[in-house]
Amino acid sequence: MHVDSSDGVSIAVHDLGGAGPPLIVAHATGFCGRAYEPFAAALADLRHVWAFDFRGHGDSTSPANGRFDWGGSADDLLAVIDAIADGPVDLVGHSMGGGAAALAEQRRPGCLRSAYLFEPIIVPAGPDDTSGGNFMAQTAAKRRDTFPSFADALLRYAAKTPLAHLNAGALAAYVQHGFAEQPDGSVRLKLTPAEEAAVFDAGGKPTTDVAASMHTPVTVAVGAVGEGFSPARFGELVVDALPDGHLVSFADLGHFGPLEAPTTVAADVRRWLASQ
């Protein structure tokens, strides 16, 4: 189904199955909700799992006004919550999805019953100097957006880091649902490189001050694998800011943890849900 968000955006919401109370999965930048199908399958006996595509991603539409700021991401999440739940919901947020969850909870306290955030984009409080000249934005803008076929895209990604580290099922789901087939049989990314760059370069990122306003129980999970910058470096700062925060570290995972090892992360989510 689709739900209306701000800026005339239509958000695609995916029922990933399962039984029990709703659990929302909010994806990382550049991915889409259905890439988390293997993760959702590991929770199907416990929760009814829903995922969605943030604006411009997957099957959601892009804002005509080009608004990809963080407030828009929070709008998208709140629209989904309103569509599938009558009260507070549990949420798993990955990277951008975790940051959007923090902003949504700040804007509407109590919309989340609890949250499990894997390396959320929540930065130290201070001047917002993270927009403009963003390395990730520059890299995204140069990303190859077309391949001869779905199979060619899958083979390319499976052989190249960082996507080579993804679980085979998650990578296949991402390629299947993150690309659109063209009339000539080639495939093209649904999220254009320019739009992905705009997401990475957006201002208004949630800060530790936003985290401090979240009174819902929150687990922050981080991976220990990777070189260079990673949101994992802010994990302890975020947990220190949260009124009810807990830190979990995965020694063998990197930033894409829920997509690298869906069953491993899902097992910890099960532990977290049982503790609520």
Image (cartoon, helix red, strand yellow):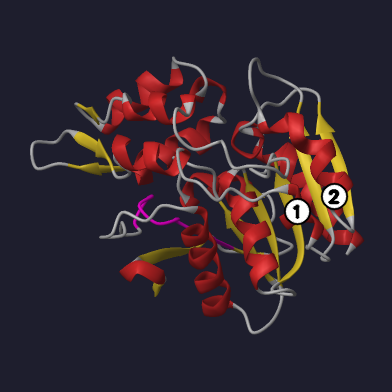
Q: Left or right of 274: which side holds 72?
A: left
**Residues rendered magenta in the picture:** 50-59
Where residue 33 appears, x then y in whole percent?
49, 52
Where residue 164 appears, x then y in whole percent?
51, 20
- Could you tell me the amino acid type at mark 2? Ala
On screen, 124 above or below 50?
above
* Count of numbered circles on the image: 2
What separation in Å lies between label 1 and label 2 (alpha carbons)?
7 Å
On screen, 156 above or below 72?
above
Residue at 88% of width from left, 64% of height from top?
A: 276
The answer to which of 247 and 251 lies nearer the viewer is: 247
Where residue 115 appears, x then y in whole percent?
75, 58
> Would residue 54 be counted in the magenta stretch?
yes
Name the residue at the left extreme. 184
Residue at 56% of width from left, 70% of height from top?
A: 78
Residue identifier under label 1: 209
Q: Are marks 1 and 2 in contact (CB under 8 Å)?
A: yes
